[in-house]
Image (cartoon, rainbow, N blue to C red):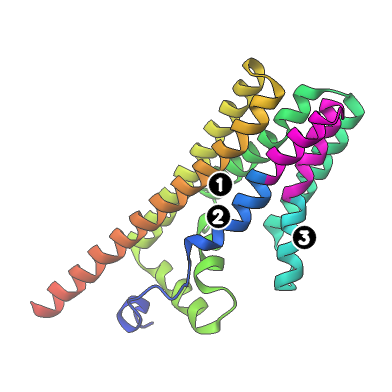
Amino acid sequence: MTDATATNPQPPGNFSWTQMLPTLVFDVALPILLFNALNRYGVPTLWALVAGGLSPAINNLRVWVKSRRVEPLGVIVIAFLAVGTAASLISGSVFFALIKDSFLTATFGLICLGSLLGARPLMFYINRQFVAGDDPARLEWWNGLWELPDFRAAMRLVTAVWGIAYLIEALLRVGLALVLSPAQVVTISPITAFGVLIALIAWSRRYLLAVRERRLRAQQQAAAG
């Protein structure tokens, strides 16, 4: 098979940091604003937490409507939010409502680490969705990269880093819920989650681009030799 990087050395994705704005609005800003507004008007803390937690679910529904396609990861997020919300209301526990998102975060981290035992790690598929989408040529380009040993190693390392980072984040958010007030947790927790996500994306992009540049330099040197 032809080396995909030789025929198309440039990443075909069109990722932009502006794509993160909906996440910033729906997953960070709105939960904080809703909780504080409802608390100010005397709504019980538990119900204010539940209402604030609906915003990420709305964001997933917005993505489904816009793309007209249901993503498995989005289904998992909705399912965890629904189960966590129901469990919070049934138990009446404010603490559980504060940490319910940590279960989703920890589960994602465990799935990342568990996928390292499979044929291809989870981040290979997640990155493929962002980079290639449904474009047949881009999908062929991305799938062809798996033949390259350095790409396989890079995908496994990225998946391991994401898995470990999300497990640490889950523990950190549980710790915050133990020592801070609900209002403080509602403010700090989503900002922490968004910060971790941005840091992981930035590091992953920089690392994968560095791997690609090293491979291209090696190909050029081999061709020159």
- The residue under label 1 is which amino acid type? Cys
- The residue under label 2 is which amino acid type? Leu
Residue at 77% of width from left, 69% of height from top?
A: 65
Give the residue number, with chain letter if any, for mark 3. Answer: 61
2 or 1: tag closer to the N-terminus: 1
Quadrant housing residue 34: top right
Disc 2 versus disc 3: nearer the observer? 3
Label drawn at residue 90: none
Q: Give the magenta range.
A: 30-56
Q: Main secondary structure of the magenta part?
A: helix
Give the structural element (helix, strand or loop) at label 2: helix
Give the structural element (helix, strand or loop) at label 3: helix
Q: Within 10 Å of the Cα at label 1, are there few (<14), some (14-19), or many (20+) other Cα atoms? A: many
Residue at 48% of width from left, 67% of height from top?
A: 15
User: Could you say where residue 96 lies in the image, as x and y percent from the top left?
Assistant: 77, 26
Give the residue number, with chain letter if any, for mark 1. Answer: 112
Give the residue number, with chain letter if any, for mark 2. Answer: 122
Q: Within 10 Å of the Cα at label 2, are there few (<14), some (14-19), or many (20+) other Cα atoms? A: many
Can you see residue 123? yes
Disc 2 and disc 1 in contact, CB within 8 angstroms: yes
Residue 43 inside the magenta-drawn segment: yes
